[in-house]
Amino acid sequence: MLFELKANKVATMKNDLLSGLTVALALVPEAVAFAFVAGVEPLVGLYAAFMVGLITAAIGGRPGMISGATGALAVVMVTLVADHGVQYLFATVVLMGIIQVLAGALKLGKFIRMVPHPVMLGFVNGLAIVIFLAQLGQFGVEGETGWLSGTFMEDSVIDIAWMQGGELGMMLGLVALTMAIIHFLPKLTKAVPSSLAAILVVSLLVIGLDLDTRTVGDVAGIAGGLPEFSVPMVPLSMETLLIILPYSLILAAIGLIESLLTLRMVDEITETHGSSNRECMGQGVANIVTGFFGGMGGCAMIGQSMINVNSGGRGRLSGISAALFLLAFILVASSLIEQIPVAALIGVMFIVVIGTFEWSSFRIMRKVPGGDAFVLVLVSVVTVLTDLAVAVIIGVIVSALIFAWEHAKQIQIEKKEDREGSSVYKVHGPLFFGSTTHFLEQFSPKDDNNDVVIDFADSRVCDHSGLEAIDTLAERYTKAGRNLHLLHLSQDCQKLLKKAGSMVEVNVIEDPKYFVATNA
């Protein structure tokens, strides 16, 4: 592969500080853009990037991961802001944080382990495509387009009035130069993160030669003061709660899903392990504080996290320094930051896209099971067309259905007659909701002998559907006038069976001991 994200194996203060500066430079236009998407002032996005980034870096569960305002959350916020105003957004962010803290306290972060690997690959590929599409907005004519939001459908690149002629050539040339520096500089020296060096070189080139190209200042001004504490100005009533609660739940879910999946990705790249429950707590505390200081809330940012890792940022200092550098830009260095050409930041993000996308997924598509390949593509497409949370939920559901379908085929029924003239069935494989239909089709009560034995020694009843199938079978044999004997079922099965419970023959020594998943 031409470009590849390679994590520095050694965490140093110098690497963390320099990578933090690189991340802070790239944070500015994205935070401003996502604020526009949400329908709020640029400083609301910048304050969120500063506070969420600082707090999660300090107390979160994944050193080296970067958090801030994101497009995935912004596209949910826009309706709330339009209908009720920014103060309701701040209240929603506070409640969102409380929900996330509760998720961490209840140790719900462990459920991210249930996300299958094909879903993870689809998430990575989908977000890489989203990041790429988000950069294309800057190739539009100034005043007619802005930085694209987190989804393709929200602001389609098809509707952009594209740059023409020399303006487009200048932008493309600077992007290519940025990417070339990032790729080739590490072959000469690793003393300075290549992304930071590329931004500085391209910026000095544009300023020194007075090149006419779009800069950060053309996107929005970033000058401001320190964020101030303020309780959201909303009525303390049940009506307010009913307005903000649905948004808070959705934002909390999206924020945690994106953060925990990004955590897993950084874990794999750095070959270390973060704490998912601690990350839930960190995200929650960060959003609570942000809501009281006029920020739009946020979560982990896969693009910025990859920039940080690729630049050598491994410790908590990298995220903390990125947040503090960003605050410094807002307070004292806004005039300098606004001179950075947007092309340099686009080049950095294009390198992130190339390094983030799992190119190996094309090679393995024909080697993995068809169901896994389908899920990978499905999650990638849904991530681009809608948002991350929907894509992951759909991916997990489809993976579960494919798993159930495949395991439904594993149940086998073996039939024979014993010396006493009884019809004996031996069940092999799990009996659950996916296999009950095939299970019932294997029995013929009218054709069997008067005495029928069903042996579950090589099977296990997994859920309520399995119990219902056995009860249905017992009812059929009773109507057919046959004597049914059920062997090697657990004591829990016997208690839960309604019609077949009396037909279970108990063998304390041989009977298995397990519980059935049911609400009964």
Image (cartoon, helix red, strand yellow):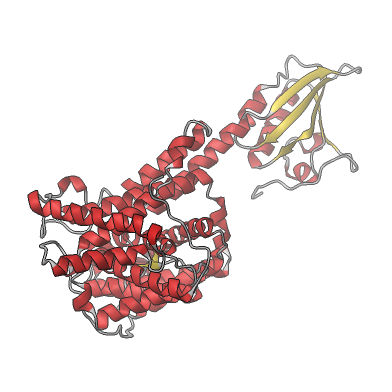
Residue 407 position (above or below residue 186): above
Residue 216 percent coordinates (x, y)? 20, 67
Specify the quadrant of the image occupied by residue 453. top right
Residue 313 position (above or below residue 114): below
Q: Quadrant of the N terminus?
A: top left
**Observer-nearest of 13 and 477:** 13
Specify the quadrant of the image occupied by residue 105. bottom right
| Residue plotted at (44% across, 71% down) | 15
Return the residue found at the far front. 188
**Observer-nearest of 134 and 415:** 134
Is residue 387 at least partly visible in the picture?
Answer: yes
Is residue 286 at least partly visible in the picture?
Answer: no
**Observer-nearest of 325 and 453:** 325
Return the residue found at the far left. 165
| Residue plotted at (34% across, 54% down) | 351
In the visual, does 369 lie left or right of 168? right
Residue 425 position (above or below residue 173): above
Residue 14 percent coordinates (x, y)? 44, 75
Residue 102 percent coordinates (x, y)? 52, 70
Specify the quadrant of the image occupied by residue 202. bottom left
| Residue plotted at (50% across, 69% down) | 63
Return the residue found at the far top. 447
Tell me how many marks there are: 0
